[in-house]
Image: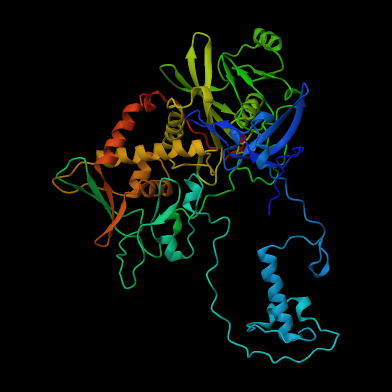
Amino acid sequence: MTKMADSGSSVEIVEGCRLPVLRKNQEHEDEWPLAEILSVKEVSGRKLYYVHYIDFNKRLDEWVTSDRLDMKKLQFPKKEAKTPTKNGLPGSRPSSPEREVRKSLDLNLQSATAPSRGKTLPTPQITNEADCGNNSCSSQKRKVEPVPLVPQVPPAPPVPSLPTSTEASPAAVYPAARETNTFKTREDHDQISSLTTNGTARRLITSQPGRKRKANCGPTDEMIKVLQYNKPQSASVFLPPPEDSQDSSDGIPTAPRMTGSLVSDRSHDDIVTRMKNIECIELGRHRLKPWYFSPYPQELTSLPILYLCEFCLKYLKSLKCLQRHLTKCNLRHPPGNEIYRKGTISFFEIDGRKNKNYSQNLCLLAKCFLDHKTLYYDTDPFLFYVMTEYDSKGFHIVGYFSKEKESTEDYNVACILTLPPYQRRGYGKLLIEFSYELSKVEGKTGTPEKPLSDLGLLSYRSYWSQTILEILMDLKPDNGERPQITINEISEITSVKKEDVISTLQYLNLINYYKGQYILTLSEDIVDGHERAMQKRHTRIDPKCLHFTPKDWSKRGKW
């Protein structure tokens, strides 16, 4: 039970305490969410508290004054458990369910072989003597009363194990991660499930015994038939069910791969990296408030403003240093090759080996707004594609994405970021669209490195949905017959990986089951929503303006 503070007594707030903290919500109304105190400091005789709002994104963490704290509901941190002692006496560490189960099994097995003196204990049915631990099966020196053993029973059939951490659900790949769905068996894995809007997975089709499946072809090669109804805005896409023996690589993704080059494993999180260390960044004509920790040099973290050159991204400690630097800096655009220009939008390709300083400075800046990625000072294996806006003063950075020169997982994006001043203006989708245009030139299908941030997830979901719906709606009847298309063809046209295509159809909740076939139904609401969304996308990537020649990075000499 959590200990509450006495409202009448004056108590000292320490790190680890929890209490409601006043903040403004999106409607600018007062609310009191529960928050944890991560740090306490004193500035000019006034105490400040760094709080993390429980169940809120870390980018909302902030320093607050004591007048925003609700001291009446203060919860002190629980004391750490002491070193365990024998017989569960005071001072032993709190038991976990796993330890309790193991302890009870050991006790039961002990009672079956050599129970303790005095009382006769009930014994479990022993299925395998080899399962006994060394301690429980060791001989007892003291005298005990004999207890009859329960006759042995044959071992029970093995129960299918739960998925491991590497078998996360599609909800972990494309979700705001609140709930996850796991596939327990191959049959469950092969069934198509649907992702709802809150990221949870629900089953569309339950397996029915006795139903026979057609085994024409795999799930990604079946022909999709499109029916045109009387209403021109609605259509149904027929998809024959997949074979039971089809490999998961051609169907629903089993799990997000966590072996990507920049995925943060959270194993080195501590109180320092949980807190923002930079107060404010001045980049060109914009002042940015960082969301997360970034490993800039320690001496710069105490500055009220960190100054960055917007062309080479060099960090400086004062405005005077920046002005002196600008007289020497000749760059007016990112280093590297300009591979795309249309209107005021340009893309520059930067090699992490040839432009180390710029790449490292870009990673430091990006880490201020990306929490789920780690930071590497070895930028050699990466390419960086920086999007800029041009005006009379030069090319100003808008956002970027990075990718591995050689990716064994078919990743076409490692990190992707639109800087806060340019967000909600369509630049995120433009970066995503450009990454897939590069994949088309390379002749590959690609997918972003997982996990995605919440904002990255929204952008990718929206892009995949619009791209796939655009193709399905453009299908025309051929000689009076229903048009046909395969999942593979959709993947080849868009360069979107097959797993992402299937998952997007599930997320849109288009899949139904009808007369032994999977049907994709495009309702008028979906079509109308798609058309409204496409009207907002004023800026698109023009493949004719792309001047890009892919390199064979497998030859180490070209690095």
Question: Would residue 559 be visible to someone looking at this image?
Answer: no
* Residue farthest along the front direction in this orientation: 8
Location of the N terminus by quadrant is bottom right
In front here: 79 or 182?
Answer: 79
Q: Residue at x 74, y 26 (%)?
A: 297
Q: Residue at x 76, y 81 (%)?
A: 137
Q: Position of residue 183 (x, y in %)?
A: 47, 60
Q: Tell me where residue 402 sits by quadrant.
A: top right
In the image, residue 538 sits, relative to residue 191, either above or below, namely above
Question: Would residue 48 be visible to someone looking at this image?
Answer: yes
- Drawn side of residue 94 relative to residue 406, left or right: right
Q: Residue at x 76, y 78 (%)?
A: 136
In front here: 87 or 520?
Answer: 87
In the image, residue 36 sits, relative to residue 301, either above or below, namely below
Q: Residue at x 73, y 23 (%)?
A: 300
Q: Position of residue 499 (x, y in %)?
A: 43, 49
In the image, residue 209 sits, relative to residue 65, either above or below, namely below
In the image, residue 3 sits, relative to residue 493, either above or below, namely below
Q: Tell me where residue 161 sits by quadrant.
A: bottom right
- Drawn side of residue 468 relative to residue 443, left or right: left
Q: Position of residue 298 (x, y in %)?
A: 76, 27
Q: Position of residue 50 (x, y in %)?
A: 69, 33
- Drawn side of residue 228 relative to residue 239, left or right: left
